Image: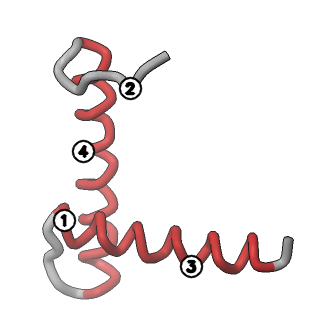
Amino acid sequence: MGAVNKFTPSGRRIFNNYLAVIKSIAQGLSKIYGQELTIYQASDRVAEVAEKIEEEVFKQV
């Protein structure tokens, strides 16, 4: 099965859910860092944390 086009009904729903999660994370991180973060900054922070988790978890394997 190929990639879901983000403009199909199901693709749009997935894309909107992704954006909603990132916006929620941005709000939470803004409280932690004491400053407003854009969804792009929040997305970068999430990617950094995911990368660190991946390194720590899979480094042991």
> Which dot, 2 or 1, sits closer to the camera?
2
Does residue 32 lie above or below 3 as drawn? below
Q: Which amino acid does label 2 sit on?
A: Ala
Return the disc, 3 or 4, that comes first in the chain's sequence: 4
Return the disc, 2 or 4, that comes first in the chain's sequence: 2
Q: In which quarter of the image is the C terminus?
A: bottom right
Residue highlighted by disc 3: 52
The residue closer to the viewer here, 51 or 34, is 51
Residue ranking furthest to the right:
61
Residue highlighted by disc 1: 40
Residue highlighted by disc 4: 19
Residue 1 placement (x, y as % from top left): 49, 16
Q: Are marks 3 and 4 in contact (CB under 8 Å)?
A: no
Dot 1 crowding, Cα within 10 Å, few <14, some 14–19, many 20+? few
Return the disc, 1 or 3, that comes first in the chain's sequence: 1
Tell me the CA gap for discs 2 and 1. 23 Å
Q: What residue type is labelled 4?
A: Leu
51 horizontally vs 42: left or right? right
Q: Do the residues labelled 1 and 4 touch (CB within 8 Å)?
A: no
Residue ranking furthest to the top:
9
